[in-house]
Image: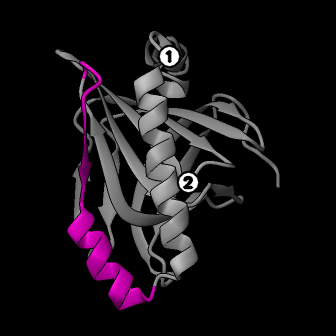
Amino acid sequence: MDFPTVGSTIEVQSYKHNGTLHRVWEETVVLKGTTHEVIGGNDRILVEESDGRKWRTREPAICYFTSDSWFNVIGMIRNDGIYYYCNLGTPFTYDTEALKYIDYDLDIKVFPDMTYKLLDEDEFDLHKRQMNYPEEVEIILRKAVDELVSWISSQKGPFEPGFIEYWYERFLQHR
């Protein structure tokens, strides 16, 4: 699997368990791209939903994907601090078309003071029934929630102080 070069742009695509396209982010600048980790930056980019609706993100963001964690993290840079939106889903794959992952509904929103809230448990329960999520997937996702909460609490990875700011400065060099 070839990875895009630093400074190039990629599309990010999320899918649902049944294989349907869920959401597409049009343009993310690659700031780091390896087989283990992809860090990207974007600002006010177009997002298209599976039903055809389109909208723009409201602020600059740094996106963090790993090949071994069942979550990805988006650090959103706002006037009153950094907010994080964490998607529970499969580790990423990359092909020449896009960076891709399966979104499993559960999300964690993290506030600038590092408090957090687990979101969309009802959506997860509904889709689990509709799409027949295997029990193994649910077990993996519950462990991923615990791992993510541990990262937040210990300020690991993208939650480390200065991480988002560092990568945002790199992003500004590519604009």
Q: Nearer the viewer, residue 137 or 157?
A: 137
Is residue 167 covered in magenta? no
Query: Which quadrant would residue 109 be assigned to in this image?
Result: top left
Residue that numbered label 2 is attached to: 70
Residue sitting at x 50%, y 26%: 158
Is residue 128 covered in magenta? yes
User: Residue 72 at x, y = what percent?
Assistant: 49, 45
Residue 93 left/right relative to 163:
right
Q: Nearer the viewer, mark 2 or mark 1?
A: 2
Mark 1 surroundings within 10 Å by alpha-carbon count, few (fewer than 14), some (14 through 19), many (20 or more)? some
Which range of residues does the magenta coloring cover? 112-132
Which of marks 1 and 2 precedes in the sequence?
A: 2
Q: Are marks 2 and 1 in contact (CB under 8 Å)?
A: no
User: Residue 87 at x, y = what percent?
Assistant: 41, 51
Q: How is the image coloured?
A: one colour
Q: At label 1, which amino acid type do we have?
A: Phe
User: Residue 132 at x, y = what percent?
Assistant: 44, 89
Query: Tag 2, which secondary structure?
Result: loop
Query: Tag 1, which secondary structure?
Result: helix
Residue 172 position (above or below residue 22):
above
Residue sitting at x 62%, y 55%: 92
Residue that numbered label 1 is attached to: 163
Q: Nearer the viewer, residue 173 or 112?
A: 112
Mark 2 surroundings within 10 Å by alpha-carbon count, few (fewer than 14), some (14 through 19), many (20 or more)? many
Q: Quadrant of the N terminus?
A: bottom right
